[in-house]
Image (cartoon, rainbow, N blue to C red):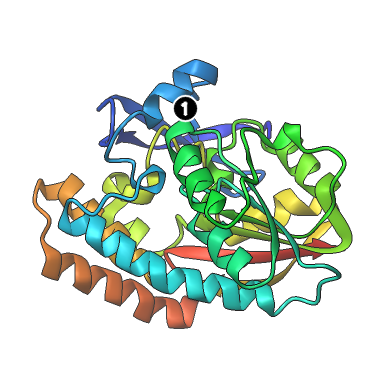
Amino acid sequence: MNSEKQPFFTCVDYTVSHQKFDLLYNANYRMLETFPKPEGEELAKYYESSDYISHTDSKASFTDKLYQAVKSVALKNKLKLINSFQTEDKKLLDVGCGTGEFLLTCKHNGWNVLGVEPNKNAQALAISKLAQHNSTAVVDELQEISSEKFDVITLWHVLEHVPDLNSYIFKLKSLLKPNGVLVVAVPNYKSFDATYYKQFWAAFDVPRHLWHFSKKSIELIFSEFDMKVDTILPMKFDSFYVSLLSEKYKTGKSNFLKAFYVGLLSNVKAMRTKEYSSLIYVLKNS
């Protein structure tokens, strides 16, 4: 991922540290990179917050309730997507499985599931849910898996967190069956809500998000691993949730109506540009 990188702008970590981080534009891959990039134990501390909702089942605030409500609809859409694939024995690996709802949904629908989740609190919640259905299939790290091959591997808002993209994608490809499908969902910094909120855009989420992708960057990166983008799908709910957080970062207030308006406008504009707030990429071996 080396290339000459140009300053884009500076963002603040609003979730944990309130430190400033730069975004650099990588022209070779048409993407943004967070600088500096925390590593190892240093990176882990930026996830230590009750506000990091993907690691909890919290319904304490209105934003939490909105997230959980949207998540239930999103789970149905995700299941519909993976059920549309032709598979041999319905083996699924969910990387960054969080608190395990997607794994559980898939298991209830006949899938053989395995999850990866490094966060201990989220992993414990996932294991407790699966244990009620005679399964505790969650491991700490992707590298722990060596002998299995999967029909479908999913990464729902995970790739932007990975410190070493090259080695990680190489490992993912090695775990995929020759005719398997890789599903990658990531924020899209080319969306209207991203360009509207600029450095306050919540989906930059520095420094937990190390990479900030465009459609072109996903195409370029995965082509180096002989993988091709087969389909790109929108995540239309993301613009509303991200706009709600972005309003709070920008103004100090939630501004529900303004956030709804920006989220709606982002989706309306994306009907023409196809630049939705987040995008799902369906990738196959080329």
Relative side of 187 to 79, left or right: left
Relative side of 51 to 216, left or right: left
Residue topped by disc 1: 35
Q: Residue at x 60, y 31 (%)?
A: 163
Seen from the viewer's position, the closer of residues 240 and 223 is: 240
Q: Which quadrant holds the C terminus?
A: bottom right
Seen from the viewer's position, the closer of residues 244 and 271 is: 244
Looking at the image, residue 58 lies above or below residue 163: below
Extreme-top residue of the structure: 41
Q: Residue at x 70, y 37 (%)?
A: 142
x%, y% of residue 53? 33, 46
Looking at the image, residue 96 lies above or below residue 219: above
x%, y% of residue 77? 51, 75
Q: Secondary structure at mark 1?
A: strand
Examine the image and state in which quarter residue 70 appears.
bottom left
x%, y% of residue 216? 63, 59
Q: Residue at x 21, y 71 (%)?
A: 260
Extreme-right residue of the structure: 178
Q: Amino acid at mark 1?
A: Phe
